[in-house]
Image (spheres, grey):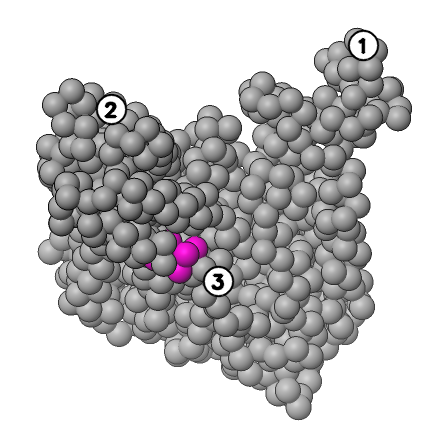
Amino acid sequence: MQIADKTKCYHCGDECEDTSIMQDEKYFCCTGCKLVYEILNENNLCTYYDLNSTPGFKQSNIINKRFAFLDEPEIARKLITFKNKNEVHVTFHIPAMHCSSCIWLLEHFKKIDSGVLISRIDFLKKELHLVFDNTQTSLREVVEKLSQTGYEPLLSLDSIEKKETKKANRNRIVRIGVAGFCAGNIMMLSFPEYFSSGKNIDSGLQYFFSYLNLLLALPVFFYSANEFFIKSWKAIRHKTTSIDIPIAIGLIAIFLRSTYEIITHTGAGYFDSGSGLVFFMLIGRWFQDFTFDSMSFDRDYKSYFPIAVTRLKDGEEKEISVNELKVNDRILIRNNEIIPVDALLLKGRASVDYHFVTGESIPISHEAGENIYAGGRQTAGIIELQVTKEVSQSHLTQLWNRSSSQNELSRFEKLVNNISRWFIVVVLLIAFGAGAYWWNTDIHKAINAFTAVLVITCPCALALSAPFTYGNILRMLGKKKIYLRNYKALEKLADVDTVVFDKTGTLTQNNSSQIEYEGDELNADDKKLLYSLTRQSSHPLSKLLTRQFKTDASYKSTHFTETPGEGIEAVLNGITVKAGTAHFAGVKNYTNDNRTSVFINISDKKKGRFVFLNSYRAGVEQMAEGLKRQSLKTAVLTGDKEQERKNLEKIFGTCEMQFNQKPEDKLNYINNLQSQNHKVLMIGDGLNDAGALLAATSGISITDNTNNFTPASDTIMDASHLEKLPQLINLSKSAVTIIIISFIISLLYNLIGISYAVTGTLSPLFAAILMPISTTTLVLFTTGVSTLKTKQAGF
C-alpha cells in the first residue's frame, strides 16, 4: 500500500509513470507538478496540501493546452517591449488586481519565478511591468505562473498604440443581475414576516417561504458572492491581508446562521439582508470601477511629452513632436539623444547605451539594417533611422520610472502600509467583540453588529487618497507640458528648500543668441565642415552654430566624440575638426576676457572663436522674485566666465554663483548642500548636468523643443513654463495638505461608522451602500480640490 501511495503524484494525484521525479521524498508525475510544489514550498505555502489531498491540477496538461502560442517568436514579439541577449521587458494587464494584497504579491513575483528581475505595479491601470532573464525563464512560463497564482493576464496582440474600447465586465453584470433578482424575490417572500413579525402566518406557508428563500439564496452566496470568497482565500493562502476577508466572514456568518434557523424552524433567517448586502456590494464595486475608469489618470498622451525629434522629409530637416512620428518616417538622432521609437538603422555608426532600459551602461554597436529599441541613447555622433513602430509614451514613462529607486517609498505609502498592516486585525476583533456582546441579549442585533462592522470599514479610501490627488495634478500638469516622472516626484518637490540653476540652456534661450566671430576668415568648405560637426551634437551652443552654418549638404563623419564641458571633434572628409574650449581646440597664450566662446580648430589650424552674447528667457526675473517670497535659497552654476555675474545679479540679486563649473563640479556642489541636510532642487537642460540632476532631491530638466530627455531628472518642463516654477513648488505643497485632510476624513468615517455599527442598529444593507459611497466621495473630494488648486496655480 505504501508503494502504491508513493507512485501517485503528490500534487495532482495522477499515477507517476516515471518515479525518478522526486523532491523531499515526494513523487511527482511531471516536472510541472514538481515545479509548483517547489514554488509553494519555497514560499511557505504548503498548507495548500494540508487542506485537501492532492489538490493541484496536472501541470503538464495545463502547459500543453494553454499558452503554448507564446512560444511562437512572432506572437511573443508583439507583446515584448524590449529584448536583448539576457533581458526581456513586457507589460501585462491584470484584471484580477484590486487590492493591496494583489499589489504585494505581484511586486514579489520574483519569489515565485526566480527568473524575474523586476516587478512593478501600476495599480490604477491594473498593469504589471516585468523584466525577466530569458536564460532562466520564458514569456510562456511567466504567464503560466501568473495564471497559477490567480492573476492571469489579459493578453492582447494588437498594436501598443491601438486604443481598445473598454467593454463592461459582463461577468460582474450577470452576477449583479442574479443577486438583484434573488434579493428582490427573497424580500417579497419575506413580506409576511415583516408585517406580522412571524405571527398569524400559517406555519406550512411560513416554512415553504423560508425554504424558497434558502433556495434563492444559494446562487447569491455561491455564484454572485464567490469573488469575495475566492479573493479572500487567495489572500489567506499567500499569508497576506485583503479587504475582502471581513466581508467574506460576514457573509458566511449570515448564511450559516440563516440556514440553521430555517432548518431547525427557529427563525426566518437573514437571507434578505445577506442577498441585499451582496447586491449592493457588487453595485458598489461596479460603481467604484466606473468612477476610477472615468477618472483614469492615464498620462499616455504623447502630446504631453515635451520631446522633439528631427524628421527628414524631402531632404529637409524639421523638428517635430514625437507624437507626429509615423511608421517609415526617417529621423536623425544626434549624440546623447534618446531614441524615442523602435527603428531600423539606415546610416551612421550606432553605439547605443541601453542603461535607461536595462541598467547596463556598456554601449552596444549596431550595423545598418539592424533594429534599435526605444529608450537607448546614441553615443557616437549622428545616425539616420527609419521608424518601425509608432512612439509609445507609456513605454518611455515606464523606463523613466524604472530608473528611479526601486525600493523608495513615499511618506504616505509608509503610513498606509503601517495602518493597513493592523487594520484588518483590529476590524475583526471589533466585529467579534460586538457580536459576542449582543449575542445573549439579542441575536438579531449581534448578527447586525458583527456584519455591519465588517462591511462598513474600509481602508481603500486611505490607500487611494494619495494616488488620486497626485494623479489628477500630474494629468493636468502634463497638459501644460510639465511632465513628472511619478507622484513621488511631486512629493519630493514639496520638501525642497534650495533651488540650484544651471545657466546655459536653462536660464538662457537655445534658439536666440547674438554670435560674433573673431579670427581667420572661414571659407565655404570650412563652414560646411563646421556644420557637419556641430549638427551631430545636441548641446545648445552646437545647435546655435548649426543654424549659423546651415547648408544643403554635409560631409560623412567618422570618429565623432563629445567631451562634456570641453567640446566636440570628428573626422570629416578626411579632416579632423574640433570645436570647444581654448584648451580643447589647442589654443594657447590667449587673453581670457571672460566671454562665452567656442574655439575652432580645422586640420590642426587654430582658426578663431565664436563669441556668444547670452539672451535670457522671458519671465526669469518674476520667477526669481517668486522663489524669494517662498524663502527658498537660490544658486547658479555655470561653465561661463565671471563676466556673466552682472547679468545674473540683475535677475537673482545676491545669491551664490559658481563660474567655470564642469559637470563634476556641479555634482560636488549638490552633494555638499545635501551633506548640510538641504533638500535641493536642481534645474538644468540634462546635458552637462545629468549627474547633478540625479544627485539632487528633485531634478527638473528644461526642454526647448529638443530631445534632451534624461532619466536623471524627475520632471521635464517645457521652457515656456520656467517662470511658473514658484507656483509648481507651491502646488506640490498644496497636494500634501489635500492628502492629509483626506486621511483625516477617511479615519473619521471609519471611526463614526464603527461606533454606529457596534450598536447593532445599523443594517448591513445600509452599510453595504455607505462603504462604496464613502470611498467614491473621498476620491471625488481629492480630485475636485486638487483640480481647483491646480487651476488657481495657473496650470
Task: Report how many numbered discs are placed on residues in the image.
Answer: 3
Disc nearer the start of the sequence (3/2): 3
Q: Residue at x 59, y 48 (%)?
A: 152
Check residue 1 in the rendering and tell me which mark sits there, or answer none. 1
> Which stretch did the figure color magenta?
175-180
Q: In this view, does 313 lie to the left or right of 599?
A: right
Q: Residue at x 35, y 62 (%)?
A: 290
Q: Does the magenta stretch include residue 189?
A: no
Q: Is mark 2 on a helix, strand or loop?
A: helix
Q: In this view, does 675 lie to the left or right of 573?
A: left
Check residue 170 in the rendering and tell me which mark sits there, or answer none. 3
Q: What residue type is labelled 3?
A: Arg
Q: Do the residues labelled 1 and 2 touch (CB within 8 Å)?
A: no
Q: Which amino acid does label 1 sit on?
A: Met
Disc nearer the start of the sequence (1/2): 1
Identify the residue position indicated by label 2 in the image.
432
Relative depth, front residue between 779 and 785: 779
Q: Does the magenta stretch include residue 179?
A: yes
